[in-house]
Amino acid sequence: MNASPQALEEFKKVLNSEELPTAGIRIFTQQGCCGPAVQMSIVEKPSNGDLQFSIDSVNFFMAESERDMLAEVTIDYGPNGFKLNGLKRNGGGSCCG
């Protein structure tokens, strides 16, 4: 997984406002009607068994099971917020609506 300079800058702003020195971004999936939906949240520490890595001093955490799906993802940030480029979706069913 990678992150653009714009995304890293925004993550740093958000994490600095939390004033938690060990905080990081936890990336996880939840099942949606079109397959897994990738979510991000600020957490004080990783969950048990999470992979931990840092990109330009920003801590990231994810479950081992997410590694393959997120391996080639680049997180970007723009006028519409965060965007995951290169996300591979494996299976997932049909979309609603």
Image (spheres, grey):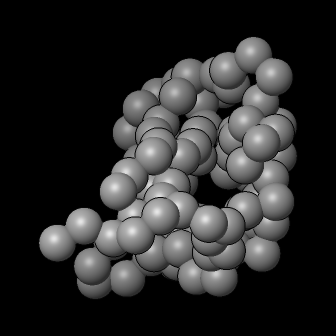
Q: Which residue appears at 73% of the width and 62% of the height?
A: 69
Q: Which residue appears at 54% of the width and 46% of the height?
A: 29
Residue 52 in the image: x percent, y percent? 81, 38
Residue 4 in the image: x percent, y percent? 62, 79
Residue 8 lies left or right of residue 81; in this view the side is: right
**Quadrant location, the C terminus:** bottom left
Residues 67 and 44: in front is 67
Residue 5 in the image: x percent, y percent? 61, 78
Residue 28: image quadrant is top right
Residue 47: image quadrant is top right
Residues 83 and 95: in front is 95
Residue 63 shows in this picture? yes
Q: Which residue appears at 82% of the width and 60% of the height?
A: 68
Q: Which residue appears at 72% of the width and 63% of the height?
A: 70
From the viewer's perspective, is residue 47 above or below residue 28? above
Query: Most extreme residue toward the front, as rendered?
Result: 94
From the viewer's perspective, is residue 89 above or below residue 36? below
Residue 54 in the image: x percent, y percent? 79, 50
Residue 95 lies left or right of residue 83; in this view the side is: left
Residue 46 lies left or right of residue 7; in this view the side is: right
Query: Most extreme residue toward the top, as rendered?
Result: 48
Residue 78: image quadrant is bottom left
From the viewer's perspective, is residue 12 above or below residue 34? above
**Quadrant location, the N terminus:** bottom right
Residues 46 and 67: in front is 67
Residue 54 shows in this picture? no
Residues 22 and 31: in front is 31
